[in-house]
Image (cartoon, rainbow, N blue to C red):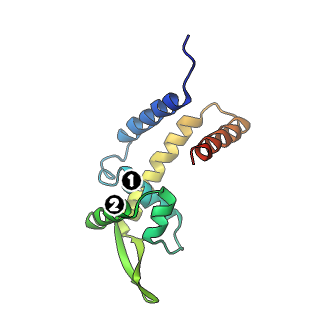
């Protein structure tokens, strides 16, 4: 019998999660805030009250400056974010969610909460703590 492969199992789980979210109850309303847009949107919303700049997006998601710039430009075109100049440094532009993005983020959080409940059903708190520790260790091993 072939030995189980963690990477293959995690990829299969990721694919299942993605498919499930594609058929979520709010899919229609959040259709154009998918993938990286949705993750970035969530990151900005989660850090509400803090100034978020392109460099923060680059660092948090470990992406190149050119990639971050393209994604943020598209998000701005879609009306999800605004880039506001900072008075103290004309080169910096603070990233701010539009009202539409705030509403989309709320719907996405509802869908993710349902997903988390499905994923963790039947696990004890101790098992979840152990699982999170293992996943974090795996991520750290790759960096």
* N-terminal label among 1 and 2: 1
Which residue is situated farthest in the right direction here? Answer: 126
Quadrant of res 6: top right
Q: How many marks?
A: 2
Q: Position of residue 26 (x, y in %)?
A: 36, 47
Distance from label 1 to label 2 (Cα)? 8 Å
55, above or below 89, in the image: above
Asked whether 135 or 46 is in front, the reply is 135
Q: Position of residue 103 (x, y in %)?
A: 39, 61
Query: Residue at the spot x=54%, y=73% of the render?
Result: 50
Q: Which mark is residue 127?
A: none
Q: Which residue is mark 2?
A: 71
Q: What is the secondary structure assignment of the residue under circle 2?
A: helix
Residue 31 appears left or right of 97: left
In the picture, the quarter occupied by the N terminus is top right
Residue 1 appears left or right of 111: right
For label 1, count other residues whose C-alpha is less than 10 Å away and answer few (under 14), some (14-19) or many (20+). Answer: some
40, above or below 98, in the image: above
Asked whether 131 or 33 is in front, the reply is 131
Residue 15 appears left or right of 7: left
Q: What is the secondary structure assignment of the residue under circle 1?
A: helix
Q: Which residue is mark 1?
A: 36
Whether residues under marks 1 and 2 lie with C-beta atoms below 8 angstroms apart, the answer is: yes
């Amino acid at each position: 019998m072939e030995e189980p492969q963690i990477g293959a199992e995690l990829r299969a789980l990721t694919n299942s999660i993605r498919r499930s979210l594609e058929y979520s109850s709010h899919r229609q309303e959040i259709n154009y805030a998918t993938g990286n847009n949705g993750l970035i949107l969530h990151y900005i919303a989660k850090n509400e009250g803090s100034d978020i700049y392109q460099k923060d997006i680059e660092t948090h998601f470990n992406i190149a400056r050119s990639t971050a710039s393209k994604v943020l430009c598209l998000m701005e075109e879609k009306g999800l974010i605004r880039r506001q100049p900072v008075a103290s440094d004309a080169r910096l532009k603070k990233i701010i969610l539009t009202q539409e993005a705030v509403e989309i983020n709320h719907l996405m959080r509802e869908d993710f909460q349902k997903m988390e409940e499905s994923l963790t059903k039947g696990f004890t708190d101790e098992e979840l703590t152990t699982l999170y520790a293992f996943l974090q260790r795996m991520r750290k091993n790759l960096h």
